Amino acid sequence: MPGWAALAGTARVEWAEGPPSGLPLGTSEPFLRPDSLPLLGEERVVRIRGPFFTDGRVPFRALFAPALAALNGLDEHPELIRKCGMTACTPLTVLAQGNGCAWLRVRVEEVTKLVEAAPMVDRPPMDRSSLLALPAATEAEFHTGVTVLAELIHKLKVPGKNPSHPLGRLEQHLAARLPAIDQDVVREAVHTLDRQRLAGWARQPLVS
């Protein structure tokens, strides 16, 4: 498990694929582990190892990793990071306990994929990022801001080849990677950038 997960206590949570037969309390006893992220509102069974502190029915944070990554670590299976996530779980029932371990039935309150939590690109330098955050006072600032956006799009490495220009694939790519993003805002931004591209970066106003 990552060091930050161990510090947060989440490395002490192990996920099971349904209630394991006999609810093994020994850490060396195997049990079936899930491969898919838990769903919001779903009830799942987890094993926790002490010391583990939680405040009654208050949700606790728990890292989810699919079976192979949970057993062997992400260093051995880096491709599985897309199936990992941070969850918030409310304890519902203690199913069994002993030997410093306990099996709980929990309800999943939050799920955040690790690939969504991590930045998709590095933040531009302050003098460049300010061009994205502040209104353009002049046409020159507008064109410079569009150039910064184009640089970010290049760094996103939008997959696919159809349509040929990445702008045409950007909206679908961001919707897949960031489901909660405001797609109307993305669509408007892509439309503005595409107008600029088709204008051949001509220094003429795109807005009146």
Image (tube, rainbow, N blue to C red):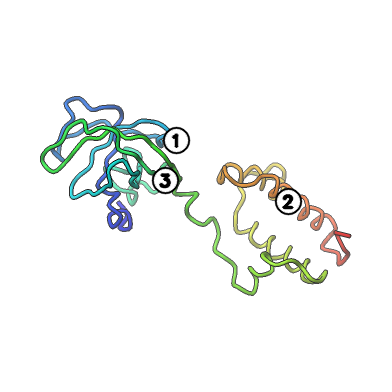
The type of residue carrying mark 1 is Leu
Q: Earlier in the sequence, mark 3 or mark 1?
A: 1
Q: Name the residue under label 1.
A: 40
Dot 3 amino acid type: Glu
Q: In this view, does 117 lie above or below 143?
A: above
Count of picture labels: 3
Disc 2 residue type (three-letter): Val
Q: Tell whether 77 sits left or right of 96.
A: right
Which quarter of the figure is the C terminus placed in?
bottom right
Local crowd size for mark 1, using a 10 Å CA cut-off: few (<14), some (14–19), many (≥20): some
Residue 168 position within the rendered picture, expressed as x and y whole percent measured from the top left: 72, 46
Residue identifier under label 3: 79
Write the residue at 56% across / 46% down. 178
From this view, report whether residue 206 is shown above or below residue 181. Answer: below
Q: Which residue is labeled 2 in the image?
A: 190
Q: Horizontal placement of 169 versus 101: left or right? A: right
Numbered disc in front, either 2 or 3 = 2
Indicate which disc, 2 or 3, sits on the residue closer to the N terminus. 3
